[in-house]
Amino acid sequence: MHETHGAGRRLARIVALTCALTAAPAAAGPRVWQPKDGAVTEGEVEVHARPSTVYRALTEYAKWPALFSDIAWSAVKSGGRENAVIQFKSHTFPKPQHVRFRNTHNRLVRYELIDGPSGVKVQWETAIEPNADRGTTKIRIRLTVVVGGIYGWIVTKEKVRKYRESKMTKDVRDLAKHFPPPKPAPATAPTPPT
């Protein structure tokens, strides 16, 4: 009876080891930070998807509300994936954003505010970097918001920083959820000798 019990333990260890070895490598979790430039917030996340898949998701602008929980609605006004002009409403920022994209296919998604309050500049730049060693893609986002002019007197730098940080945190978490790691293949236990 003890032999059977020991064989069961060995079998359980083999199954556990097999599962550990066949599981996809863990991707780096979402990170958000404030670089020294006071107008910038950066974030990154490593996802289990090819760069082309990430680029496609980021440039399907009409589907942004399904990708980003912070986006209430979005509408493409003109252009295509690389040069679209869109309007969207973020839950974080108080007014709809009207932006123009200047992207680099499968590598960079970048927009800037084109129709906003005087003195307000917004740029969102997302670099898409393959990590072939891990079979993942790193998504690095840089959000710049500068509030000048009359709005600079009304809206504090601290409030703008909180807006940026809130938006960035939501965006990197949403991207991590949208591209989850693959589920490991079910482990099959070896059949015991008869």
Image (cartoon, rainbow, N blue to C red):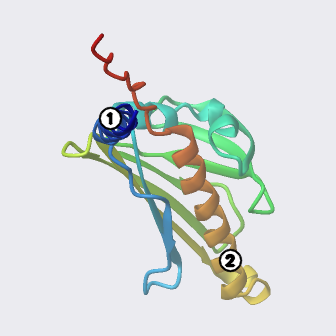
Give the residue number, with chain letter if any, for mark 2.
162
Work out whether 128 lies above or below 121: above
Residue at 46% across, 31% down = 183
Residue at 62% across, 71% down = 165
Where residue 82 sits, quadrant-wise, is: top left
Query: Which quarter of the figure is the C terminus placed in?
Result: top left
Residue at 49% across, 60% down = 30
Viewer-proximal residue, 39 or 42?
A: 42
Measuring from the top left, give residue 46's x and y in whole percent: 39, 51
Work out whether 194 lies above or below 112: above
Q: Which-is-in-front pick, marks 2 and 1?
A: 1
Amino acid under disc 1? Glu
Viewer-proximal residue, 72 or 16?
A: 16
From the viewer's perspective, tell me whether residue 79 is left or right of residue 95.
left
Where residue 51 sits, quadrant-wise, is: top left
Give the residue number, with chain letter if any, for mark 1.
3
From the viewer's perspective, tell me whether residue 56 is left or right of residue 65.
left
Label 1 crowd bin: few (<14), some (14–19), many (20+), radius 10 Å: few
Q: What element carries label 2?
A: helix
